[in-house]
Amino acid sequence: MSDCLHVGTKKGLFTLRRNSAADKWTITRRDFLGEPVSMLFHDTRDGSLYCALNHGHFGVKLHRQEQGEETWTEIAAPQFPEQTPAEKQQEEEKEGRPNSWSLSQIWALESGGEDQPGVLWAGTIPGGLFRSPDRGESWQLLRSLWDRPERLQWFGGGYDDPGIHSVCVDPRDSAHVTVGVSCGGVWATRDGGETWALCADGMRAEYMPPELAGAGNVQDPHRLVNCPADPDTFWVQHHNGIFRTTDDCQSWQELDRVQPSGFGFAVAVHPQNPDTAWFVPAVKDECRIPVAGKMVVTRTDDGGQSFIIMSDGLPATDAYDLVYRHALDIDATGRNLVMGSTTGSLWVSSDAGESWQTVSQHLPPVHVTRFAG
């Protein structure tokens, strides 16, 4: 089990380490106290840690910590190019309002392939995808996706503007990248971002008029992940249920009769077994709390044909915790999970979710959790 994990919250970054003899986790470091952390990323290629901060009115900042170092270095944050008058008019005509093309949040950070040292990907709000060739020292907006006419039909889910929250790089081919957009569906490139294809066939958006429910460009995938050992298998926790594909996003199948709910935000997939995935169900739309006030995690081991409901160690009554998109993480063994909630609770499991240990009940609201390695 990884003995180190990072927890990004509304009021700072917390690093925890595990005493293996006592099987106890302890906060050992606190960084950026009082600052909202929107995203974390641990780059296993060189051991560096990246932390994105959302300062609201004062802008977005990005920091990097080198492996073995104590200090952080501020690096460049993605920036949108200046909008031309023609682009502003086009978006205003489509959206009914001008789009400022101004970065409000870094919502995804991922590395390029093993054959791309230094390459990073960033997904943002509004829905831009950025690439860095030099470990975040500089960033370039992929205009090939940004300039797609379909982007003008994207819209916000939980935020006013649409955003890219999931980036999956194929470990077999670094030029093959798939992203999830809320609300804009699933998009993929096979040539490093030169061209893009919409890949949401089979998804369903019940919040749209019936004739548009199946349109790929209006889908709201809350989180998109794929299995490292079988990259053609993807899982999506969608606003309207759980979806799975085994043919590299060519067609999606909705899972039926998911209990206690098919709604949620987070999903984790086993790193070696594409049929095993974890979810944190909730009541959707205006409510957004655990079903019947009972905190549970569900797991499927057979590709979604059946689900196990697991609650050992989790609050059974009067629980109002919601687990955000990036607040559930799994380590490389596939046995150890961590999740944090909107009420500041933090839990870990060392037996694939069968039982959970409470690490804290009074952190700030948790935005993202990451095992270190």
Image (cartoon, rainbow, N blue to C red):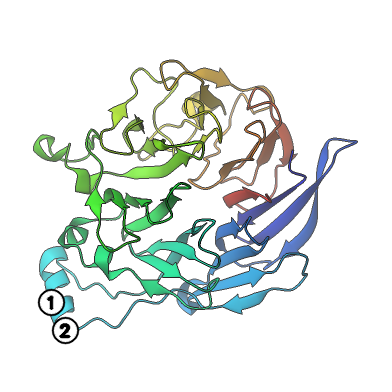
Residue at 50 percent of width and 56 percent of height:
113
Q: Amino acid at mark 1?
A: Gln
Which residue is label 2 attached to? 85
Q: Residues within 10 Å of mark 2 (few under 14, many from 20)?
A: few
Residue at 13 percent of width and 39 percent of height:
209
Which quadrant of the rendered structure holds the N terminus? top right
> Mark 2: which secondary structure?
helix
Q: Amino acid at mark 2?
A: Pro
Which residue is label 1 attached to? 89
Left or right: 291 with respect to 242? right
Q: Residues within 10 Å of mark 1 (few under 14, many from 20)?
A: some
Residue 300 percent coordinates (x, y): 49, 22
Task: Say whether residue 23 is visible.
Answer: yes
Q: CA–CA distance between discs 1 and 2?
A: 6 Å
Residue 339 percent coordinates (x, y): 61, 40
Residue 87 percent coordinates (x, y): 17, 77
Asked whether 230 or 80 is in front, the reply is 230
> Mark 1: which secondary structure?
helix
Residue at 47 percent of width and 26 percent of height:
291
